[in-house]
Image (tube, helix red, strand yellow):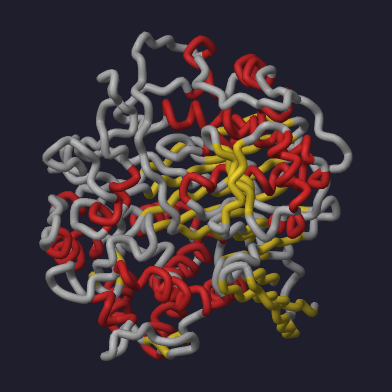
Protein backbone atom coordinates (compact mmCIF):
# COMPACT_ATOMS: atom_id res chain seq x y z
CA UNK A 1 0.00 0.00 0.00
CA UNK A 2 1.18 3.53 -0.72
CA UNK A 3 0.96 6.29 1.81
CA UNK A 4 1.81 9.93 1.43
CA UNK A 5 3.11 12.54 3.80
CA UNK A 6 1.91 16.06 3.41
CA UNK A 7 3.74 18.63 5.49
CA UNK A 8 2.33 22.11 5.21
CA UNK A 9 4.58 24.72 6.79
CA UNK A 10 3.40 28.14 7.64
CA UNK A 11 6.23 30.45 8.64
CA UNK A 12 5.35 33.80 10.16
CA UNK A 13 6.84 36.93 11.60
CA UNK A 14 4.11 38.82 13.44
CA UNK A 15 0.93 38.38 11.39
CA UNK A 16 2.73 38.06 8.04
CA UNK A 17 2.94 34.52 6.72
CA UNK A 18 3.82 32.38 3.75
CA UNK A 19 3.40 28.67 3.12
CA UNK A 20 5.24 25.84 1.44
CA UNK A 21 4.10 22.32 0.67
CA UNK A 22 6.28 19.26 0.57
CA UNK A 23 5.08 15.91 -0.73
CA UNK A 24 6.80 12.61 -0.30
CA UNK A 25 5.67 9.13 -1.33
CA UNK A 26 6.90 5.93 0.24
CA UNK A 27 6.12 2.27 -0.30
CA UNK A 28 4.99 0.08 2.58
CA UNK A 29 4.06 -3.57 2.57
CA UNK A 30 2.28 -3.94 5.90
CA UNK A 31 -1.46 -3.82 6.48
CA UNK A 32 -3.25 -0.48 6.11
CA UNK A 33 -3.06 1.85 9.06
CA UNK A 34 -5.34 4.60 10.21
CA UNK A 35 -4.40 8.06 9.08
CA UNK A 36 -2.22 9.86 11.61
CA UNK A 37 -1.55 13.56 12.06
CA UNK A 38 0.67 15.97 13.98
CA UNK A 39 0.19 19.72 14.34
CA UNK A 40 2.83 21.76 16.17
CA UNK A 41 4.13 25.32 16.14
CA UNK A 42 7.46 24.45 14.50
CA UNK A 43 8.46 22.40 11.44
CA UNK A 44 11.30 20.61 13.27
CA UNK A 45 8.86 19.49 15.96
CA UNK A 46 6.29 18.25 13.47
CA UNK A 47 8.96 16.24 11.63
CA UNK A 48 10.14 14.71 14.91
CA UNK A 49 6.59 13.68 15.76
CA UNK A 50 5.94 12.18 12.32
CA UNK A 51 9.20 10.23 12.44
CA UNK A 52 8.11 8.66 15.73
CA UNK A 53 4.66 7.75 14.41
CA UNK A 54 6.20 6.30 11.25
CA UNK A 55 8.40 4.08 13.42
CA UNK A 56 5.32 2.70 15.16
CA UNK A 57 5.30 5.05 18.10
CA UNK A 58 2.23 6.15 20.02
CA UNK A 59 0.83 9.65 20.36
CA UNK A 60 2.59 9.92 23.73
CA UNK A 61 5.89 8.80 22.18
CA UNK A 62 5.50 11.53 19.57
CA UNK A 63 4.68 14.11 22.25
CA UNK A 64 7.97 13.35 24.02
CA UNK A 65 9.99 13.79 20.84
CA UNK A 66 8.10 16.96 19.96
CA UNK A 67 8.61 18.63 23.33
CA UNK A 68 12.31 17.72 23.36
CA UNK A 69 12.66 19.55 20.03
CA UNK A 70 10.51 22.53 21.02
CA UNK A 71 12.65 23.01 24.12
CA UNK A 72 15.53 23.67 21.71
CA UNK A 73 14.00 25.47 18.71
CA UNK A 74 11.18 27.38 20.46
CA UNK A 75 12.80 28.22 23.83
CA UNK A 76 10.78 31.40 24.17
CA UNK A 77 7.68 29.28 24.67
CA UNK A 78 8.36 25.98 26.43
CA UNK A 79 11.07 23.60 27.56
CA UNK A 80 12.03 20.54 29.57
CA UNK A 81 12.69 22.77 32.59
CA UNK A 82 9.08 23.97 32.43
CA UNK A 83 5.64 22.43 32.86
CA UNK A 84 2.69 21.08 30.88
CA UNK A 85 -0.76 19.51 30.82
CA UNK A 86 -1.65 16.60 28.56
CA UNK A 87 -5.08 15.19 27.70
CA UNK A 88 -4.92 11.65 26.28
CA UNK A 89 -7.68 9.70 24.54
CA UNK A 90 -7.40 5.91 24.28
CA UNK A 91 -9.20 4.84 21.11
CA UNK A 92 -9.61 1.24 22.30
CA UNK A 93 -11.10 1.89 25.73
CA UNK A 94 -12.67 5.26 24.80
CA UNK A 95 -11.24 6.65 28.02
CA UNK A 96 -9.64 10.02 28.67
CA UNK A 97 -6.76 10.66 31.04
CA UNK A 98 -5.15 13.90 32.15
CA UNK A 99 -1.47 14.14 33.02
CA UNK A 100 -0.63 17.16 35.19
CA UNK A 101 2.97 18.34 34.91
CA UNK A 102 2.40 21.78 36.39
CA UNK A 103 5.39 23.11 38.34
CA UNK A 104 5.19 23.48 42.11
CA UNK A 105 6.46 26.17 44.44
CA UNK A 106 9.50 25.33 46.59
CA UNK A 107 9.08 24.37 50.22
CA UNK A 108 10.66 27.72 51.12
CA UNK A 109 8.09 29.82 49.24
CA UNK A 110 6.34 32.55 51.26
CA UNK A 111 3.11 34.44 50.73
CA UNK A 112 4.94 37.78 50.44
CA UNK A 113 7.84 36.66 48.21
CA UNK A 114 6.72 38.92 45.35
CA UNK A 115 5.99 41.96 47.53
CA UNK A 116 8.17 45.03 48.05
CA UNK A 117 8.91 46.37 51.52
CA UNK A 118 5.98 48.79 51.27
CA UNK A 119 3.58 45.95 50.46
CA UNK A 120 3.22 46.77 46.76
CA UNK A 121 3.60 44.03 44.17
CA UNK A 122 7.06 43.63 42.68
CA UNK A 123 7.27 44.89 39.07
CA UNK A 124 6.63 41.91 36.82
CA UNK A 125 9.90 42.00 34.90
CA UNK A 126 11.86 41.98 38.16
CA UNK A 127 9.92 38.99 39.40
CA UNK A 128 10.22 37.20 36.06
CA UNK A 129 13.98 37.67 35.66
CA UNK A 130 14.84 36.23 39.03
CA UNK A 131 15.33 33.06 40.98
CA UNK A 132 12.14 33.79 42.90
CA UNK A 133 9.93 32.78 40.00
CA UNK A 134 11.21 29.26 39.24
CA UNK A 135 9.13 26.29 40.33
CA UNK A 136 10.15 22.63 40.40
CA UNK A 137 9.96 21.55 36.71
CA UNK A 138 7.15 19.15 35.87
CA UNK A 139 7.00 18.41 32.14
CA UNK A 140 9.64 15.68 32.03
CA UNK A 141 8.20 13.77 35.00
CA UNK A 142 4.76 14.05 33.42
CA UNK A 143 6.00 12.74 30.08
CA UNK A 144 7.77 9.86 31.84
CA UNK A 145 4.56 8.94 33.67
CA UNK A 146 2.54 9.05 30.44
CA UNK A 147 5.17 6.98 28.63
CA UNK A 148 5.06 4.24 31.25
CA UNK A 149 1.33 3.90 30.60
CA UNK A 150 1.00 4.78 26.91
CA UNK A 151 4.43 4.49 25.29
CA UNK A 152 5.31 1.82 22.74
CA UNK A 153 8.86 2.77 21.70
CA UNK A 154 11.87 2.78 23.99
CA UNK A 155 12.14 6.00 26.00
CA UNK A 156 15.76 6.59 25.01
CA UNK A 157 14.96 6.47 21.29
CA UNK A 158 12.66 9.50 21.47
CA UNK A 159 15.36 12.15 21.87
CA UNK A 160 17.47 11.45 18.79
CA UNK A 161 15.91 14.18 16.63
CA UNK A 162 16.39 16.86 19.29
CA UNK A 163 19.90 15.64 20.05
CA UNK A 164 20.96 15.84 16.40
CA UNK A 165 19.60 19.38 16.10
CA UNK A 166 21.37 20.44 19.28
CA UNK A 167 24.71 19.05 18.09
CA UNK A 168 24.56 20.01 14.41
CA UNK A 169 22.58 23.21 14.87
CA UNK A 170 19.24 24.57 13.70
CA UNK A 171 18.47 27.74 11.79
CA UNK A 172 17.00 30.53 13.88
CA UNK A 173 13.42 30.91 12.68
CA UNK A 174 11.69 34.20 11.86
CA UNK A 175 9.65 34.00 15.05
CA UNK A 176 12.60 33.28 17.33
CA UNK A 177 14.59 36.09 15.75
CA UNK A 178 11.62 38.43 16.13
CA UNK A 179 11.40 37.58 19.80
CA UNK A 180 15.09 38.35 20.28
CA UNK A 181 14.72 41.70 18.53
CA UNK A 182 11.61 42.66 20.52
CA UNK A 183 12.47 41.24 23.91
CA UNK A 184 16.24 40.91 23.88
CA UNK A 185 16.55 44.05 25.98
CA UNK A 186 15.16 42.05 28.91
CA UNK A 187 17.86 39.37 28.68
CA UNK A 188 20.64 40.23 31.18
CA UNK A 189 23.85 41.30 29.43
CA UNK A 190 25.90 42.01 32.57
CA UNK A 191 26.33 40.04 35.82
CA UNK A 192 24.72 42.92 37.71
CA UNK A 193 21.51 42.32 35.77
CA UNK A 194 21.66 38.56 36.27
CA UNK A 195 23.21 35.42 34.78
CA UNK A 196 24.27 36.10 31.17
CA UNK A 197 24.13 32.60 29.63
CA UNK A 198 21.15 33.46 27.40
CA UNK A 199 22.78 36.67 26.18
CA UNK A 200 25.93 34.79 25.21
CA UNK A 201 23.80 32.14 23.48
CA UNK A 202 21.70 34.49 21.37
CA UNK A 203 23.89 37.56 20.76
CA UNK A 204 27.22 38.16 19.02
CA UNK A 205 30.23 39.97 20.48
CA UNK A 206 28.80 43.32 19.37
CA UNK A 207 25.56 42.68 21.25
CA UNK A 208 23.50 42.07 18.11
CA UNK A 209 20.98 39.22 18.04
CA UNK A 210 21.96 36.37 15.73
CA UNK A 211 20.05 36.82 12.46
CA UNK A 212 17.26 34.76 11.00
CA UNK A 213 18.79 31.65 9.45
CA UNK A 214 21.81 31.63 11.76
CA UNK A 215 22.89 28.07 12.58
CA UNK A 216 22.57 27.86 16.35
CA UNK A 217 24.15 24.94 18.22
CA UNK A 218 23.50 23.89 21.80
CA UNK A 219 25.99 21.23 22.94
CA UNK A 220 24.94 21.65 26.58
CA UNK A 221 21.39 20.66 25.69
CA UNK A 222 22.71 17.64 23.79
CA UNK A 223 24.49 16.53 26.99
CA UNK A 224 21.29 17.02 28.98
CA UNK A 225 19.37 14.87 26.50
CA UNK A 226 21.95 12.09 26.79
CA UNK A 227 21.37 12.00 30.54
CA UNK A 228 17.59 12.14 30.20
CA UNK A 229 17.49 9.49 27.47
CA UNK A 230 19.23 7.01 29.76
CA UNK A 231 17.08 7.75 32.81
CA UNK A 232 14.48 10.52 33.17
CA UNK A 233 14.75 10.36 36.96
CA UNK A 234 18.35 11.60 36.65
CA UNK A 235 16.88 15.00 35.80
CA UNK A 236 15.31 15.14 39.27
CA UNK A 237 17.90 13.37 41.38
CA UNK A 238 21.28 14.11 39.81
CA UNK A 239 23.55 16.95 38.78
CA UNK A 240 20.90 18.64 36.64
CA UNK A 241 18.69 19.25 39.69
CA UNK A 242 21.66 20.54 41.67
CA UNK A 243 22.64 22.89 38.85
CA UNK A 244 19.07 24.20 38.54
CA UNK A 245 18.89 24.88 42.27
CA UNK A 246 22.28 26.63 42.22
CA UNK A 247 21.19 28.86 39.33
CA UNK A 248 17.89 29.70 41.04
CA UNK A 249 19.74 30.70 44.22
CA UNK A 250 21.96 33.20 42.40
CA UNK A 251 21.43 36.92 42.84
CA UNK A 252 19.80 39.19 41.95
CA UNK A 253 16.53 38.24 43.64
CA UNK A 254 17.62 34.73 44.57
CA UNK A 255 14.98 32.06 44.98
CA UNK A 256 14.64 29.26 47.50
CA UNK A 257 14.21 26.25 45.19
CA UNK A 258 16.47 23.40 46.28
CA UNK A 259 17.60 20.13 44.75
CA UNK A 260 15.45 18.44 47.38
CA UNK A 261 12.38 20.35 46.13
CA UNK A 262 13.09 19.15 42.60
CA UNK A 263 13.61 15.56 43.74
CA UNK A 264 10.31 15.67 45.62
CA UNK A 265 8.28 16.72 42.56
CA UNK A 266 5.54 14.31 41.50
CA UNK A 267 3.31 14.54 38.41
CA UNK A 268 -0.39 13.85 38.93
CA UNK A 269 -2.76 11.75 36.87
CA UNK A 270 -6.25 13.25 37.05
CA UNK A 271 -9.69 12.50 35.67
CA UNK A 272 -10.70 14.70 32.77
CA UNK A 273 -13.45 17.25 33.27
CA UNK A 274 -16.17 17.00 30.63
CA UNK A 275 -18.99 19.36 29.75
CA UNK A 276 -21.98 18.26 27.68
CA UNK A 277 -22.43 20.50 24.68
CA UNK A 278 -25.27 19.71 22.29
CA UNK A 279 -24.53 16.11 21.19
CA UNK A 280 -20.84 16.19 22.10
CA UNK A 281 -18.67 16.16 25.19
CA UNK A 282 -15.98 18.82 25.54
CA UNK A 283 -13.23 17.60 27.83
CA UNK A 284 -10.14 19.07 29.41
CA UNK A 285 -7.93 19.52 32.45
CA UNK A 286 -9.22 20.08 36.00
CA UNK A 287 -7.63 22.69 38.29
CA UNK A 288 -5.03 24.03 38.67
CA UNK A 289 -5.76 24.44 34.94
CA UNK A 290 -8.41 27.02 34.08
CA UNK A 291 -10.06 24.73 31.53
CA UNK A 292 -13.26 25.03 33.58
CA UNK A 293 -13.77 28.40 31.90
CA UNK A 294 -13.71 26.75 28.48
CA UNK A 295 -16.43 24.33 29.56
CA UNK A 296 -18.41 27.17 31.13
CA UNK A 297 -18.32 29.34 28.02
CA UNK A 298 -19.57 26.52 25.81
CA UNK A 299 -22.26 25.64 28.35
CA UNK A 300 -23.38 29.27 28.54
CA UNK A 301 -23.51 29.50 24.73
CA UNK A 302 -25.63 26.35 24.55
CA UNK A 303 -28.15 27.92 26.94
CA UNK A 304 -27.90 31.48 25.60
CA UNK A 305 -29.30 33.30 22.57
CA UNK A 306 -28.98 31.23 19.42
CA UNK A 307 -26.39 32.43 16.92
CA UNK A 308 -27.62 33.63 13.56
CA UNK A 309 -26.77 31.79 10.38
CA UNK A 310 -24.45 34.65 9.39
CA UNK A 311 -21.79 33.24 11.76
CA UNK A 312 -18.71 35.46 12.09
CA UNK A 313 -20.20 38.08 9.78
CA UNK A 314 -22.85 39.04 12.34
CA UNK A 315 -21.71 41.37 15.17
CA UNK A 316 -24.53 39.97 17.31
CA UNK A 317 -22.81 36.57 17.34
CA UNK A 318 -19.56 38.19 18.49
CA UNK A 319 -21.51 40.09 21.18
CA UNK A 320 -23.00 36.84 22.52
CA UNK A 321 -19.56 35.22 22.60
CA UNK A 322 -18.01 38.25 24.33
CA UNK A 323 -20.56 38.18 27.14
CA UNK A 324 -20.20 34.43 27.62
CA UNK A 325 -16.46 34.99 28.02
CA UNK A 326 -16.97 37.79 30.53
CA UNK A 327 -19.20 35.58 32.66
CA UNK A 328 -16.82 32.62 32.67
CA UNK A 329 -13.65 34.65 33.18
CA UNK A 330 -15.19 36.32 36.23
CA UNK A 331 -15.80 32.98 37.91
CA UNK A 332 -12.47 31.56 36.78
CA UNK A 333 -10.50 34.46 38.25
CA UNK A 334 -12.31 34.19 41.55
CA UNK A 335 -12.29 30.47 42.28
CA UNK A 336 -9.64 28.48 40.40
CA UNK A 337 -6.40 27.44 42.13
CA UNK A 338 -4.51 24.31 43.22
CA UNK A 339 -7.13 21.77 44.40
CA UNK A 340 -4.77 20.51 47.12
CA UNK A 341 -4.94 23.94 48.77
CA UNK A 342 -8.30 25.47 47.89
CA UNK A 343 -11.90 24.21 47.82
CA UNK A 344 -13.61 25.07 44.55
CA UNK A 345 -17.21 24.80 43.31
CA UNK A 346 -16.16 22.73 40.30
CA UNK A 347 -19.45 20.88 39.90
CA UNK A 348 -21.36 24.08 40.47
CA UNK A 349 -19.43 25.93 37.77
CA UNK A 350 -20.36 23.25 35.22
CA UNK A 351 -23.90 22.70 36.51
CA UNK A 352 -26.45 23.05 33.71
CA UNK A 353 -28.88 25.08 35.82
CA UNK A 354 -26.10 27.43 36.90
CA UNK A 355 -24.88 27.90 33.35
CA UNK A 356 -28.45 28.54 32.19
CA UNK A 357 -28.83 31.20 34.89
CA UNK A 358 -25.59 32.85 33.73
CA UNK A 359 -26.74 32.68 30.10
CA UNK A 360 -29.86 34.67 30.98
CA UNK A 361 -27.61 37.64 31.71
CA UNK A 362 -26.57 37.87 28.07
CA UNK A 363 -28.29 40.88 26.57
CA UNK A 364 -28.93 42.47 23.19
CA UNK A 365 -29.02 45.90 24.80
CA UNK A 366 -26.74 48.65 23.56
CA UNK A 367 -25.07 48.89 26.97
CA UNK A 368 -23.80 45.38 27.84
CA UNK A 369 -22.79 44.89 31.44
CA UNK A 370 -19.42 43.70 32.69
CA UNK A 371 -20.64 40.82 34.76
CA UNK A 372 -19.66 40.15 38.32
CA UNK A 373 -18.79 36.80 39.86
CA UNK A 374 -21.66 34.36 40.16
CA UNK A 375 -22.51 31.98 42.97
CA UNK A 376 -21.72 28.47 41.71
CA UNK A 377 -21.51 27.28 45.33
CA UNK A 378 -25.32 27.28 45.36
CA UNK A 379 -25.23 24.54 42.69
CA UNK A 380 -22.32 22.58 44.14
CA UNK A 381 -22.43 19.31 46.09
CA UNK A 382 -20.78 21.00 49.06
CA UNK A 383 -21.51 24.58 50.19
CA UNK A 384 -19.04 27.21 51.36
CA UNK A 385 -19.46 30.33 53.45
CA UNK A 386 -15.97 31.61 52.68
CA UNK A 387 -15.60 34.77 50.59
CA UNK A 388 -12.79 34.43 48.07
CA UNK A 389 -10.58 37.46 47.59
CA UNK A 390 -10.58 39.42 44.36
CA UNK A 391 -7.86 37.97 42.16
CA UNK A 392 -4.65 39.89 41.44
CA UNK A 393 -2.84 37.43 39.16
CA UNK A 394 -0.89 38.69 36.15
CA UNK A 395 -0.98 36.31 33.16
CA UNK A 396 1.77 36.68 30.56
CA UNK A 397 2.21 34.97 27.16
CA UNK A 398 4.92 32.38 26.50
CA UNK A 399 3.58 28.88 25.77
CA UNK A 400 3.16 26.24 23.02
CA UNK A 401 0.45 23.76 22.06
CA UNK A 402 0.37 20.69 19.84
CA UNK A 403 -2.03 17.90 18.92
CA UNK A 404 -1.37 14.34 17.74
CA UNK A 405 -3.45 11.43 16.42
CA UNK A 406 -1.43 8.24 16.03
CA UNK A 407 -1.94 5.31 13.67
CA UNK A 408 -3.98 3.49 16.30
CA UNK A 409 -6.33 6.43 16.75
CA UNK A 410 -5.06 7.51 20.16
CA UNK A 411 -4.96 11.27 20.67
CA UNK A 412 -2.82 13.74 22.60
CA UNK A 413 -3.68 17.39 23.17
CA UNK A 414 -0.81 19.01 25.08
CA UNK A 415 0.08 22.53 26.17
CA UNK A 416 3.55 23.25 27.57
CA UNK A 417 5.24 26.39 28.85
CA UNK A 418 8.11 28.13 30.61
CA UNK A 419 5.56 30.90 31.40
CA UNK A 420 6.83 34.20 30.03
CA UNK A 421 9.07 34.70 27.00
CA UNK A 422 12.37 32.81 27.61
CA UNK A 423 11.19 32.06 31.16
CA UNK A 424 13.51 33.60 33.73
CA UNK A 425 16.19 34.04 30.99
CA UNK A 426 18.41 31.83 33.20
CA UNK A 427 19.80 28.67 31.59
CA UNK A 428 20.96 25.30 32.89
CA UNK A 429 22.05 22.41 30.69
CA UNK A 430 21.04 24.32 27.56
CA UNK A 431 17.48 24.78 28.88
CA UNK A 432 15.64 27.89 30.00
CA UNK A 433 14.33 27.83 33.55
CA UNK A 434 10.65 28.52 34.02
CA UNK A 435 9.21 31.58 35.75
CA UNK A 436 5.95 29.80 36.55
CA UNK A 437 5.64 31.16 40.06
CA UNK A 438 4.69 34.54 38.61
CA UNK A 439 1.44 32.78 37.68
CA UNK A 440 0.52 33.14 41.36
CA UNK A 441 -1.21 36.26 42.59
CA UNK A 442 1.54 38.51 43.98
CA UNK A 443 -0.91 39.73 46.63
CA UNK A 444 -2.29 37.10 49.04
CA UNK A 445 -5.31 39.07 50.26
CA UNK A 446 -7.55 41.63 48.60
CA UNK A 447 -8.29 45.13 49.94
CA UNK A 448 -10.99 43.69 52.19
CA UNK A 449 -8.62 41.15 53.73
CA UNK A 450 -10.16 38.15 51.97
CA UNK A 451 -7.71 35.39 51.03
CA UNK A 452 -6.98 35.14 47.29
CA UNK A 453 -7.34 31.55 46.05
CA UNK A 454 -4.29 31.71 43.79
CA UNK A 455 -1.87 33.15 46.36
CA UNK A 456 1.63 31.74 46.84
CA UNK A 457 2.16 28.86 49.28
CA UNK A 458 4.90 26.23 49.75
CA UNK A 459 4.58 23.24 47.37
CA UNK A 460 1.49 24.77 45.74
CA UNK A 461 0.92 24.68 41.97
CA UNK A 462 0.07 28.06 40.46
CA UNK A 463 -3.16 28.44 38.54
CA UNK A 464 -2.67 27.93 34.81
CA UNK A 465 -4.60 29.15 31.79
CA UNK A 466 -3.40 26.18 29.72
CA UNK A 467 -6.48 24.40 28.40
CA UNK A 468 -5.69 21.47 26.11
CA UNK A 469 -9.02 20.07 25.01
CA UNK A 470 -10.47 16.98 23.35
CA UNK A 471 -14.05 16.82 22.03
CA UNK A 472 -15.89 13.49 21.83
CA UNK A 473 -18.92 12.76 19.65
CA UNK A 474 -22.20 11.28 20.85
CA UNK A 475 -20.72 7.77 20.64
CA UNK A 476 -17.71 8.67 22.77
CA UNK A 477 -15.39 8.66 19.75
CA UNK A 478 -12.71 11.28 19.16
CA UNK A 479 -14.02 14.29 17.26
CA UNK A 480 -11.62 17.20 17.76
CA UNK A 481 -8.45 18.20 19.63
CA UNK A 482 -7.59 21.84 20.15
CA UNK A 483 -5.69 24.29 22.34
CA UNK A 484 -3.39 27.28 22.23
CA UNK A 485 -0.69 29.28 23.95
CA UNK A 486 -1.40 32.85 25.03
CA UNK A 487 -1.55 33.39 28.81
CA UNK A 488 -5.06 34.00 30.10
CA UNK A 489 -6.13 34.51 26.47
CA UNK A 490 -5.76 30.73 25.96
CA UNK A 491 -9.31 30.22 27.17
CA UNK A 492 -10.74 32.58 24.56
CA UNK A 493 -8.50 31.29 21.78
CA UNK A 494 -9.42 27.66 22.45
CA UNK A 495 -13.13 28.46 22.63
CA UNK A 496 -12.90 30.32 19.32
CA UNK A 497 -12.06 27.10 17.47
CA UNK A 498 -15.01 25.28 19.03
CA UNK A 499 -17.39 28.13 18.30
CA UNK A 500 -16.13 28.41 14.74
CA UNK A 501 -16.61 24.70 14.04
CA UNK A 502 -19.69 23.83 16.13
CA UNK A 503 -21.61 27.13 16.32
CA UNK A 504 -20.69 28.85 13.05
CA UNK A 505 -20.15 25.81 10.79
CA UNK A 506 -16.57 26.55 9.72
CA UNK A 507 -13.80 24.12 8.83
CA UNK A 508 -10.92 23.97 11.36
CA UNK A 509 -8.54 26.25 9.44
CA UNK A 510 -11.22 28.89 8.94
CA UNK A 511 -12.00 28.70 12.66
CA UNK A 512 -8.33 29.17 13.56
CA UNK A 513 -8.06 32.07 11.10
CA UNK A 514 -10.99 33.90 12.72
CA UNK A 515 -10.05 37.16 14.48
CA UNK A 516 -9.12 36.61 18.09
CA UNK A 517 -11.39 38.17 20.70
CA UNK A 518 -10.71 38.19 24.44
CA UNK A 519 -13.40 39.53 26.78
CA UNK A 520 -12.06 39.38 30.32
CA UNK A 521 -13.54 42.07 32.54
CA UNK A 522 -14.72 45.33 31.05
CA UNK A 523 -12.53 45.50 27.95
CA UNK A 524 -13.18 43.44 24.83
CA UNK A 525 -9.96 43.03 22.86
CA UNK A 526 -10.36 42.41 19.13
CA UNK A 527 -7.40 41.47 16.96
CA UNK A 528 -6.30 44.49 14.96
CA UNK A 529 -5.63 43.78 11.31
CA UNK A 530 -7.74 40.62 11.36
CA UNK A 531 -11.09 41.94 12.61
CA UNK A 532 -13.18 43.74 9.98
CA UNK A 533 -13.73 47.39 10.81
CA UNK A 534 -17.46 46.80 10.48
CA UNK A 535 -17.33 44.30 13.38
CA UNK A 536 -15.22 46.64 15.53
CA UNK A 537 -17.61 49.55 14.90
CA UNK A 538 -20.68 47.43 15.53
CA UNK A 539 -19.31 46.11 18.81
CA UNK A 540 -18.67 49.68 19.94
CA UNK A 541 -22.21 50.63 18.90
CA UNK A 542 -23.50 47.75 21.04
CA UNK A 543 -21.84 49.39 24.04
CA UNK A 544 -18.69 47.29 24.42
CA UNK A 545 -15.45 48.87 25.56
CA UNK A 546 -13.43 47.73 22.54
CA UNK A 547 -9.65 47.69 22.25
CA UNK A 548 -8.38 46.81 18.77
CA UNK A 549 -5.19 45.13 19.96
CA UNK A 550 -2.17 44.05 17.96
CA UNK A 551 -1.22 41.61 20.71
CA UNK A 552 -3.75 38.83 20.13
CA UNK A 553 -1.08 36.36 19.07
CA UNK A 554 -2.47 32.85 19.43
CA UNK A 555 -0.77 29.62 18.40
CA UNK A 556 -3.68 27.27 17.86
CA UNK A 557 -3.24 23.66 16.76
CA UNK A 558 -6.35 21.68 15.81
CA UNK A 559 -7.24 18.24 14.47
CA UNK A 560 -10.82 17.36 13.47
CA UNK A 561 -12.11 13.91 12.56
CA UNK A 562 -14.49 14.23 9.64
CA UNK A 563 -17.58 12.02 9.16
CA UNK A 564 -15.68 9.67 6.83
CA UNK A 565 -13.00 9.15 9.47
CA UNK A 566 -10.27 11.17 7.77
CA UNK A 567 -8.45 13.87 9.69
CA UNK A 568 -8.35 17.58 8.97
CA UNK A 569 -5.72 19.73 10.65
CA UNK A 570 -5.35 23.44 11.21
CA UNK A 571 -2.23 25.41 12.16
CA UNK A 572 -2.13 29.01 13.30
CA UNK A 573 -0.62 31.39 10.74
CA UNK A 574 0.20 33.80 13.55
CA UNK A 575 3.12 31.55 14.50
CA UNK A 576 5.09 28.92 12.57
CA UNK A 577 2.43 26.25 12.63
CA UNK A 578 3.01 23.04 10.69
CA UNK A 579 0.57 20.25 9.81
CA UNK A 580 2.03 16.79 9.18
CA UNK A 581 -0.02 13.88 7.85
CA UNK A 582 1.04 10.24 7.78
Instruction: Please give left or right for residue 195 compared with residue 172 in the image.
Output: left
The reply to whether residue 55 is in sight is no
| Above or below, comparing residue 555 to residue 545 in the picture | below
Which residue is located at x 42 percent, y 27 percent? 334
* Among the 4 quarters of the image, the one containing residue 474: top right
Image location (x, y in percent) of residue 396: 41, 51
Outermost residue toward the right? 309
Image quadrant containing the C terminus: bottom right
Depth check, front residue: 170 or 423: 423
* Among the 4 quarters of the image, the one containing residue 435: bottom left
Which residue is located at x 19 percent, y 46 percent? 106
Image location (x, y in percent) of residue 274: 59, 33
Depth check, front residue: 28 or 410: 410
* Among the 4 quarters of the image, the one containing residue 158: bottom left
| Above or below, comparing residue 295 to residue 397 in the picture | above
Which residue is located at x 79 percent, y 79 percent? 2
Depth check, front residue: 277 or 315: 315
Instruction: Please give left or right for residue 429 compared with residue 473 in the image.
Output: left
Instruction: Please give left or right for residue 367 compared with residue 285 in the image.
Output: right
| Above or below, comparing residue 578 to residue 112 in the picture | below
Depth check, front residue: 170 or 567: 170
Amino acid sequence: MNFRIWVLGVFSAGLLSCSAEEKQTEKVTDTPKQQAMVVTANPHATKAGLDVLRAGGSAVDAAIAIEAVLSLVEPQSSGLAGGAFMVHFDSETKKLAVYDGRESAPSGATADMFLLENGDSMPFIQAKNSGLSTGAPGVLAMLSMAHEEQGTLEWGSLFSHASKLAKEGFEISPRLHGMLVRFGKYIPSTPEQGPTDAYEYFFDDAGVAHPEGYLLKNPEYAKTLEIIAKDPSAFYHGEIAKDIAAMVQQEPRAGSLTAEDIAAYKPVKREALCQDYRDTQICGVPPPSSWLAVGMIMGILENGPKPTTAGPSDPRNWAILAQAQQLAYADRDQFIADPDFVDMPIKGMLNKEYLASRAKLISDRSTPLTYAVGNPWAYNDTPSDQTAGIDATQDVHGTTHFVIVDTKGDVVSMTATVESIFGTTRMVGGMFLNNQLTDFSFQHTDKNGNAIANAVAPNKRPRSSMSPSIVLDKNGEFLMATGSPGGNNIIAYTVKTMVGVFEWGLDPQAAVDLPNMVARGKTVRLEKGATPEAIISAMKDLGFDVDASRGENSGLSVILRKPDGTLEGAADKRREGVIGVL
